[in-house]
Amino acid sequence: MICTKCGGTRFNSWNRCMDCRNQRAKVRAERVKKNGGSHTSTEWKSLLANSPNCAECVRPWAEIPPRPDPRYKHPWTKGHKIPIYHGGSDDISNIQVECYECNFRKNAGALGRARTGNTNPVKKPNSGNNMPTAQERISRRFSFILNNGTEVFPVQMKRRDTGTIAFRVSPGGTGGNTLEASEEVDEETMVRKVLEEGYAVRCRSLDGNTNGLYKHGHRSVREIRRNAT
Ligand SMILES: [Zn+2]
Ligand SMILES: [Zn+2]
C-alpha cells in the first residue's frame, strides 16, 4: 500500500498514512507555538474535574458513545474554544473539555475549509468563545444561582439523530441522567416541569464554562432566580 498523497508506505492499524499524520502534527505544533499561551497538566485536570459535560453538545460523558478506537478509554478530549487553526492560544482560558465527536467534527470542518480555500472570517482572540450560540439557545424564564455564584440558564440541545432542538428535562432523583430517561420539551413545558414538578434541566452558563443537569434542591444550587435577566 502506498499513500496517494505523499507516497509514504507506513500505515497505522486504521490504514492512515503515518508520514501524513506526522506532517499534520508538525504543522499543528508550529501553529500552537506561533499562537502562544500554555497550560499545565494540573490546570487541565482541574478543568476536567469541573466539566461533567461536553462544552459543545452539552451531553454528559455517560451519553457519549464509546470511541471507535478502543485504545482511547475516555469520551472527552481537550478542545480549543478558538481553534488553533483560527489563531487560538493554548492558554487554559482557551481550553475546554469536549467529547471526541464534537472535537473531530470541529477539526474536520477546519480541514475542509483549508482544502477548499473557503475560509470563514478569522475569529478575533478574546472575542469570546461560543457565547452568541449559547445565548440564542438559552431560556431566560429562570436561572439557577450555584453555590459558587455562577448563574446557569436552561439550554436547548440538538439531538444528533433527529436534529430537533429542545430543552431536555429529567425526572427528579437519580438515574435521570441518560437520554432514555429524559424528555425533550418546549420552553413552556420545561418551565412548568422544573419549577412545579421538580424536574432537572440541562443548563449552561453564559460563558459556556459551566454545564450540567440542575434542579431545585440540587446540592450545588443556591437559589432560583425567576425571570432572569
Ligand atoms: Zn501520506
Ligand atoms: Zn460534544
Image (cartoon, rainbow, N blue to C red):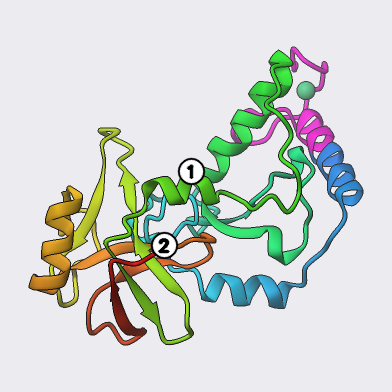
Nearer to us in this view, 163 or 120: 120
| 226 falls in the magenta region | no
| Cα distance between the residues tagged 1 and 2 | 20 Å
Question: Which residue position holds label 1?
Answer: 101
Q: Which of 109 and 185 is in front in this view?
A: 185
Q: Is residue 208 positioned above or below 43 on the image? A: above
Q: In which quarter of the image is the C terminus?
A: bottom left
Mark on residue 60?
none
Residue 195 location in percent, x, y? 15, 71
- Span shown in magenta: 1-24
Q: Crowdedness of circle 1 by 10 Å Cα count: few (<14), some, many (20+)? A: some
Please tell me whether residue 33 is drawn above or below residue 24 in the rendered image: below
Q: Which amino acid does label 2 sit on?
A: Arg
* Residue 114 visible in the current orientation: yes
Q: So how many labels did they put on this image?
A: 2
Q: Where is residue 93 in the image (x, y as percent from the top left)?
A: 70, 64
Numbered badge on residue 204:
2
Quarter of the image where one finds residue 44: bottom right
Q: Which-is-in-front pick, marks 1 and 2?
A: 2
Q: What residue type is labelled 1?
A: Glu
User: Could you tell me which secondary element the residue under label 2 belongs to?
Assistant: strand
Q: Residue at x 81, y 41 (%)?
A: 28
